[in-house]
Amino acid sequence: MSSRIPIVYSDEVRQALDEGRPVVALESNVITHGLKYPHNAETAHRVEAAVRKGGSVPATICIEDGAVRVGMTERDIERFASESGIPKVSSRDLPVVLARGGRGATTVASSLVAAELAGIPFFSSAGLGGVHRGAETTMDVSSDLIQLTRSKVAVVCAGAKMILDLKLTMEYLETQCVPVIAHGSDDFPAFYCASSGVRAPHRVDDEDLLARIVDLHWATGHPGGVVVTTPPRDEDAVDSDEAEAAIRDALVQAERDGVTGQGLTKYLMHAVDRATGGRTAQANMAVLISTAEVGGRLAAAHARHRA
Ligand code: PSU
Ligand code: MN
């Protein structure tokens, strides 16, 4: 019995990869679990358009019929956006869902697995998962971080989600030798906010230099990825005091409701959206789009560098 991972490519992505043109991988869990219909479908299309504007081909990833799909069609996106009950598939769930012939939405972690298998060196999303607040007792650390130590993919994002402990998230990445490079700002961004209050170890604004850094990181033999951050645009960012107050309330509610484990991120994000009257969901959508454009540009610079 074959144990190869079945991958189904869209024609456009297959062709781009064959011709050595730049491709940016994108996750689908944000469509099914992050945003509400129809904003999720509309945002997914705008994210793809932003990658194209940056000069690359978008490849939104999901699991369908027991295969990894690399490059969701418009119809796939509409179905994932509008149907309920599509499971969140992280790295640990992948073999189970594939073997059962199932489907699911990929997180950052499982999208990185798929991107590396597909030969796509760039991925973009708004906010990484990371070390949760209180992880010293819950041990809740997102597999997004662990996967970053194992998949050779450059991840372009607006930092990690602000609901997390961003200082500990940065410590983890340092311990695991994952380079964190801020592009266009000095600080590690906090997803909806321009700064997490933590300074990034490096700032590189030059796109060609960044492309060289990504390849040199892999030339060192490090088995994992690189985090490249880009801050939210000023007009999209949320006031950090307002967001922080909403996050603290959401954490109290989660504790009261006994929410832990894989449902926690979605629970917290939605509670913060409600508390801010939808401001953070709005910012989430805007940041996904602006980050995708930067991802498109950086992947294009990287493809030029390799040519
Ligand atoms: N919920 C959201 N937005 C998201 C995610 C969840 O409202 O973007 C995501 C991303 O897919 C990310 C994952 O990879 O959650 C991390 O989940 P966890 O913290 O359980 O590892
Ligand atoms: Mn978790």
Image (spheres, grey):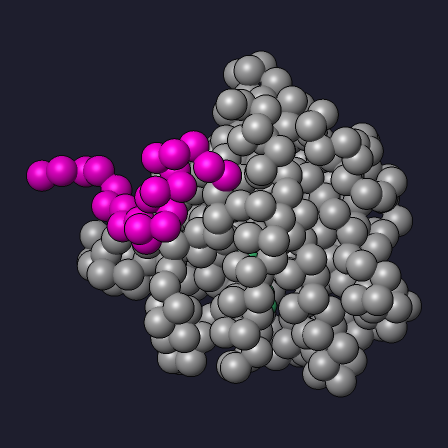
| Front residue of 91 and 200 | 200
Q: Where's the N terminus, which quadrant? A: top left
**Is residue 133 inside the magenta stretch?**
no
In magenta stretch: residue 7: yes
Residue 191 x %, y %: 73, 58
Res. 46 visible in picture: yes
Q: Is residue 134 left or right of residue 214?
A: right
Examine the image and state in which quarter residue 84 appears.
Answer: bottom left
User: Which residue, as the protein is rendered here, is positioned at the far left?
Assistant: 1
Pinpoint residue 51: horizontal percent, then vertical percent: 57, 52
Q: Is residue 243 left or right of residue 55?
A: right
Which residue is situated farthest in the top direction here? 220
Residue 216 vs residue 20: left or right?
Answer: right
How many discs mark residues in the rendered view? Answer: 0
Measuring 76% from the left and 62% from the top, which residue is drawn there?
A: 192
Task: Give above or below for 279 relative to 164.
Answer: below
* Magenta region, residue range: 1-22
As displayed, is residue 117 above or below residue 266?
Answer: above
Residue in the foreground of this view, choosing between 94 and 180 = 180
Q: Give above or below for 175 relative to 109.
A: above
Q: Which residue is rendered at x = 33% and y = 44% of the image?
A: 14
Question: What residue is at 69 percent from the left and 57 percent from the top?
Answer: 290
Q: Quadrant of ligand 1?
A: bottom right
Which residue is found at the position 32% from the left and 53% from the top? Answer: 10
